[in-house]
Amino acid sequence: MTALIGLQCHLCKASFPAEATYVCEKCLGPLEPVYDYDSIRLTREQIAQRPKNLWRYRELLPITGEPRTGFNSGFTPLVRCIRLAERLGVTELYIKDDSVNHPTLSYKDRVVSVAATRAVELGFKVLACASTGNLANSVAAHAARLGIECCVFIPDNLEAGKLLGSAIFNPTILAINGNYDDVNRLCTQVADRYGWGFVNINLRSYYAEGAKTMGFEIVEQLGWRYPKHLVSPVAGGTLLPRIVRGLRELRRIGLVDGDLPRIYAAQAAGCSPVVNALDAGVEYPEPVRPNTIAKSIAIGNPADGYQVIQCVKETGGAGAAVSDEAIVHAIQLLAETEGIFTEPAGGTTLAATIDLIKRGVIPRDESIVVCVTGNGYKTAEVVAGKLTEPVKLSRAFKEFEAWHASREAVV
Ligand SMILES: Cc1ncc(COP(=O)(O)O)c(C=O)c1O
Ligand SMILES: [Zn+2]
């Protein structure tokens, strides 16, 4: 069933076997799977008959045996937003809603489904990651279901909901005194010395492929067409380039045609190395020290920043960096207009979309997809004190009546 041939360096194109190697020994470029596309015979009808999870595109995913986990991950709703579109003054707007991904409510359930399956295939006994929170949640859940040992590394200042979202699965949690970039550096050293399967380090080539499925689904859910504009959050830079890679692959195997959408990178102003680089017209991001409420995307030194910049430029897109205030406002707007509660990463992406529309970079009369990648219930503190307070009443009916009358008087 698999078309996986091996790994290839993204930069110098040197070939490697499909093992847990992740950087090119010749030029230190990132490695990515290579498939024999000509051998893939996949039709829209075949896909339509498969279970609604990310494995419906398994020919384009880097595993050699059967999927081991993720049987309910992916195939999240693509929500047509009427009320939000009206508020923004645009005609065709969709939210790709990974805030309800299974089982841990973020886009990370896609990448972990693939990395965990590959980790089992490659014989790893410990599943690990460096995480800003969501990835740790997902790795811990998938490891629990697979019954394998799990160790997650996180910065020690994460939101309570993010910590709880890992702890409930009972992994080993190492909370490191430092930011994500410090955690990641430590994990790279651990991955090199110990035989652990770090999903986003030594298994990164496989992990990243899982993110393509968001692109596959958007095209399928739009009735096998590309949108005109697509806005993605950027942290380490896994998601955005893989959406583009997925969109290209669908065209390569004949499932869709037309021009790729313009791809836009959304970051918080308090951590915007990629948007800074786009604005400065340089190819590589300059690392920054993060300072934003959008902790899940607070990565100052993005592993795949170069690829993000390439993709944005190649598709004629742009970047937008938004303030913490705009992020919270966008979280509330999305909730109030569409009934979707996202975390700051989603608020960032929507706020960036609003900014790009206002600046005239995204036209108002063309289709727009906004990728919402995480769930607001995990980060309740960012909206605390900003929401409607409950009206407190006794259980007496007359008290309700008095309240109702006073309310009418106001209206
Ligand atoms: C909710 C959420 N959205 C988006 C991202 C962006 O990830 P990346 O750019 O590394 O794919 C992350 C993780 O880092 C995340 O947790
Ligand atoms: Zn190379």
Image: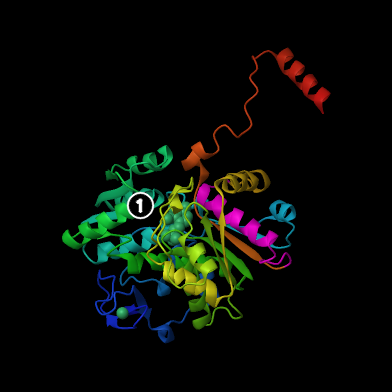
Residue behind label 1 places its C-beta within 8 angstroms of ligand 1? no
Q: Is residue 170 above or below residue 406?
A: below
> Which stretch is magenta?
341-365
Q: Quadrant of residue 186?
A: bottom left
Camera sees residue 3: no
User: What residue would you read off at disc 1?
Assistant: 180
Q: Secondary structure at mark 1?
A: helix
Crowd class of label 1 (few under 14; some 14 to 19; many from 20; radius 10 Å): many
- Image quadrant occupied by the C terminus: top right
In which of the image's four quarters is ligand 1 placed? bottom left
Q: Is residue 34 above or below residue 267?
A: below
Q: Residue furthest front?
A: 280
Question: 292 and 101: which one is in front?
Answer: 292
Q: Position of residue 326 (x, y in %)?
A: 60, 48
How does the figure colour the protein chain or chains?
rainbow
Q: Quadrant of residue 405?
A: top right
Please name the amino acid that badge 1 sits on.
Answer: Tyr
Q: Residue furthest bottom?
A: 38
359 in the magenta segment = yes
Q: Residue at x 76, y 17 (%)?
A: 401
Q: Is residue 295 left or right of residue 192?
A: right
Q: Position of residue 273 (x, y in %)?
A: 46, 61
Camera sees residue 285: yes
Most prominent secondary structure in the magenta stretch?
A: helix
Q: Position of residue 220 (x, y in %)?
A: 57, 69
